[in-house]
Image (cartoon, coloured by chain):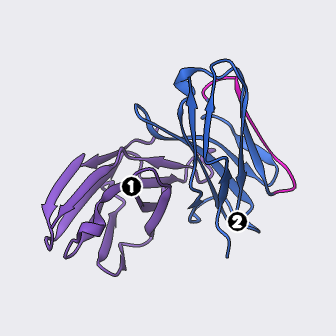
Amino acid sequence: KQEVTQIPAALSVPEGENLVLNCSFTDSAIYNLQWFRQDPGKGLTSLLLIQSSQREQTSGRLNASLDKSSGRSTLYIAASQPGDSATYLCAVTSAGGTSYGKLTFGQGTILTVHP
Amino acid sequence: GAGVSQSPSNKVTEKGKDVELRCDPISGHTALYWYRQSLGQGLEFLIYFQGNSAPDKSGLPSDRFSAERTGGSVSTLTIQRTQQEDSAVYLCASSPLTGGYEQYFGPGTRLTVT
């Protein structure tokens, strides 16, 4: 059974800092890995999707890497801003058995960027 | 274009009542997923549809939960005889096909069982 772990559970940083969020998963048979953002009381916003054959994806100040063989991904946020404050979720799409693309989520990292 | 929509956005119901939650996927998306987000359990998969059929119902927590999809479009998640532990946010997502395609999420329905 796929399990996804995110570290740290919470992170508080001053504005302008670069930061790294970590995600690990137990089964390397994945189609892809997605990073999501969730604001309080809101739905999920997809930030980056990395296919299993890729090593990284970039969007603006965000960069996500994937090491499938070791079951790890990192989300790097450059020059953090208060507007980045949210919960960040990592999810993998399993490729094995009857999983058919269902996502398995980590518990999330709650990020607070203070001015 | 229009994204995934869900209704109602909030639902408060008494224990023992039945509720129906609706999901309208992005037009043309053949795959539709239901997830549940609760305080103690995080985000967990419930069921997925390919067209109108549901090959994987493994995440449904009990036989009080059922779902259907009609016309390859709208899906309804029904919870019978609601219990307090059913209180959660129910999220729906759709993607063009199953497998490794990006899933697009709706805003969710917050269910509170009193």
| Number of numbered discs | 2
Q: What segment carries the magenta color?
A: B61-72
Name the quadrant containing residue B79. Answer: top right
Q: Is residue B65 above or below residue A109?
A: above
Name the element at disc 2.
loop
Instruction: Name the chain under label 1.
Output: A
In magenta stretch: residue B62 = yes
The circle on residue B26 is 2
Q: Is residue B51 above or below residue A97?
A: below
Q: Is A69 displayed left or right of B105 in the figure?
A: left
Residue type highlighted by circle 1: Cys
Name the element at disc 1.
strand
Disc 1: which residue:
A90
Q: Position of residue B41 (x, y in %)?
A: 43, 33
Separation of residues labelled 2 and 1 (CA atoms): 23 Å
In magenta stretch: residue B66 = yes
